[in-house]
Image (cartoon, rainbow, N blue to C red):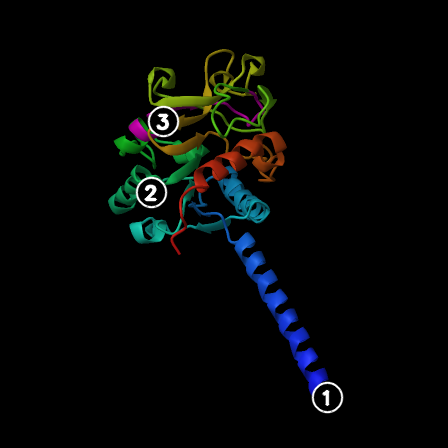
Amino acid sequence: MNTLFNRLFQQKNFALVFFVCLFNSGYAQKSKPQFKVIAFYTGRADTAHISFVHEANRWFPKIAKQYNFVYDSTNNWNNLNEKFLSHYQVVLFLDTRPELPAQREAFKEYMEHGGGWIGFHFAGFALTPSEFPQNWDWYHNEFIGAGQYKGNTWHPTSAFLRVEDSTHPAMKRLPHIFKSSPNEWYSWEKDLTKNPDIDILLAIDSSSFPLGTGPKLYEIWHSGYYPVVWANKKYKMLYVNMGHNDIDYDHHTNKELSFQFDNEIQNRFIIDALLWMGNGKKINN
């Protein structure tokens, strides 16, 4: 009797162990990250850009958990090398760009071999003379395609943005026109509409004008065509002009007055862009 009882007990235990192993295996397989994202940032100088970096490093981990990918970030631009990048499907530049030749070459190679990239706001900035001169032709003239920074609106202000290419994977869940988070909007040296490689995805709608509050008159836009998000058809990339939070500079409190990722509609195209860029390329563990 005892022998029979022990045998039944062992069989039940074996079944339980088998079920637990099977469940854990299925759960592990289901929960394996789809892809990995690495964000580079500098996080110094402009309080508005620093605010955006901190905001991004709070928001992206939440989105990564929700959509089952890995989000890492670093302010060590020396990690911009072939070995390090081989572990990631998408690179983000949150506020600046690489400066050293080896870093720049590694990034160029990464993009030319199918890597994904989203650059925010100041990541596209170049102005000669300045601390960030236009000394990288491939990046500013060919890859982003805008050339040098030309001007901006002030103060940071919401704009009505219009979808220019609803067929792009990052645009498919957006309404034709929507209101953005407050932002400092850039204008550029080059006319992107004349570049056949550039696919303009979002532009400022004319209902936004006048855009900006000044006090300088040239900081208020009254007319014109201003792209704010675009892709380069040769690469898996997006440049996103958003990335400058409103800060209370006027009263010298440096209080954060607005955030980029408080806007659910605006967030959709960032999420969809990441999913488009990240899926379909095996993670190199």
Instruction: Determine which of the numbered discs, if any, sits on residue 233 in the image.
Output: 3
Pointer 2: what residue? 98
Where residue 240 appears, x then y in whole percent? 46, 31
Percent across and percent down for residue 121 are 45, 33
> Is 147 covered by the magenta stretch?
yes
Q: CA distance from mark 1 to mark 2?
A: 73 Å
Foreground residue, 206 or 63?
A: 63
Question: Judging from the image, what secondary structure is the residue with disc 3 in?
Answer: loop
Q: Amino acid at mark 3?
A: Lys
**Residue 2: image tag:** 1
Q: Quadrant of residue 91?
A: top left
Span shown in magenta: 142-161
Q: Which secondary structure is most common in the magenta stretch?
A: loop
Label 1 neighbourhood size at 10 Å, few (<14), some (14-19), many (20+)? few
Give the percent coordinates (x, y) of residue 273.
48, 35
- Compared across the picture, whether 279 is left or right of 105 comes to right
Residue type at the position of mark 2: Pro
Residue at x-position 49% and y-position 25%: 185
Q: Vertical placement of 66 versus 268: above or below?
A: below
Q: Say which quadrant the N terminus sits in.
A: bottom right
What residue is rendered at 54% in x and 45% in y? 60
